[in-house]
């Protein structure tokens, strides 16, 4: 049957039974082995399932956008997940992990200064999503933030974290074209740039109020 209106999940956390949790590794990230079972759509319960989970905490990301010049600020840095692939240096929006005493907005404002040397004005939350829920607990908040693109330049990052981040200022249309060409391969960046492509006119009006 086709759903209409607000989506209401059939199941909730109470429909999952966690039988055991075992920490297999604890470093910069953690790996936990779960044994659990869950209710089935057809009724009854599943067999016991064993799954390894990468636990890395939650994060927040932001696409800096200058509504006056119609430009976005992107960053370029090497990523271990792509180090043996065709593009070890990835074009991305700004992002960082959320500490226990921080809000998502705190994170994007801090990371904007650390990774691009810029200060954000108005910010707007676009969505939250799980980049890889089949094996990772991370949940990522995605924002767009107002910026003066003339202030964005240079190489940034924290030395003690081994960061070497190049800043690029790009026309909004060009950045979206890079998605179509497959140049931008980061999920949060694709989501934010696609949203901006659809909503940049409305956002300009909203930020002028």
Image: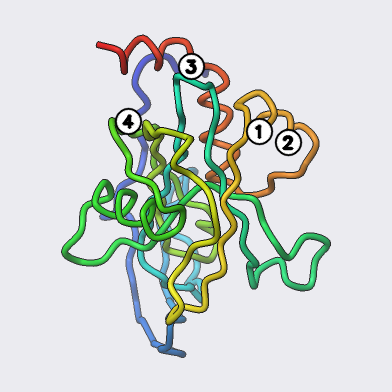
The span from disc 3 to disc 1 (Cα, nearest Å) is: 15 Å
Q: Are the residues at dot 1 and dot 4 in contact (C-beta closer than 8 Å)?
A: no
Give the spatial CA distance, label 1 vs label 2: 5 Å
- Choose mark 1 or mark 4, whichever is in front: 1
- Secondary structure at numbered mark 2: helix
Q: Is residue 7 visible?
A: yes
Question: Left or right: where does residue 92 sit relative to residue 8?
Answer: right
Specify few, some or many for label 2: CA neighbours under 10 Å numbering under 14, 14-19, or 20 or more: some
Rendered image quadrant of residue 34: bottom left
Residue for badge 4: 124
Secondary structure category for the residue under label 1:
helix
Which quadrant does the C terminus fall into?
A: top left
Mark found first going from the N terminus, 3 or 1: 1
The numbered mark, 2 or 4, whose residue comes first in the sequence reads: 4
Q: Nearer the viewer, residue 71 or 202?
A: 71
Q: Is residue 41 above or below residue 164?
A: above
* Residue at x 44%, y 54% (from the top left corner): 95
Determine whether the residue tagged by mark 3 lies in a helix, strand or loop.
helix
Report, in whole angstroms, how far the alpha carbon at label 2 lies from the one at label 3: 18 Å
Which numbered circle lies on residue 192? Answer: none
Q: Earlier in the sequence, mark 2 or mark 3?
A: 2
User: How dense is the environment of label 1, judged by Cα within 10 Å: few (below 14), some, or many (20 and up)?
Assistant: many
Identify the residue under disc 2: 178
Of label 1 and label 4, which has the lower sequence position? 4
Q: Identify the residue at image location x=36%, y=81%.
A: 21
**Residue 152 horizontal side relative to residue 166, left or right:** left
Marks 1 and 2 in Cβ contact (< 8 Å): yes
Q: Is residue 32 visible?
A: no
Label 1, on which residue? 175
């Amino acid at each position: 049957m086709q759903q209409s209106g607000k989506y209401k999940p059939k199941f909730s956390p109470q429909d999952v039974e966690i039988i055991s949790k075992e920490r297999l590794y604890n470093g910069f990230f953690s790996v936990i082995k779960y044994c659990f079972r869950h209710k089935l759509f057809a009724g009854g319960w599943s067999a016991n399932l064993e799954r390894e989970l990468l636990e890395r905490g939650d994060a927040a990301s932001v696409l800096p956008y200058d509504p006056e010049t119609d430009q976005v600020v992107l960053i370029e840095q090497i990523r271990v997940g792509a180090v043996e692939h065709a593009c070890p240096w990835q074009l991305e929006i700004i992002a960082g992990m959320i500490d226990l005493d921080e809000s998502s907005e705190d994170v994007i404002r801090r990371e904007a200064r650390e990774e691009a040397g810029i200060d954000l004005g108005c910010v707007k939350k676009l969505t939250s999503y799980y980049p890889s829920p089949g094996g990772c607990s991370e949940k990522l908040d995605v924002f767009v933030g107002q910026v003066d693109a003339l202030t964005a330049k240079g190489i940034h990052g924290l030395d003690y974290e081994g960061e070497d981040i190049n800043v690029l200022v790009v026309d909004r249309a060009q950045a979206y074209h890079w998605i179509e060409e497959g140049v931008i391969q980061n999920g949060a960046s694709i989501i934010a740039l696609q949203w901006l492509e659809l909503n940049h006119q409305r956002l300009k009006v909203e930020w002028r109020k």
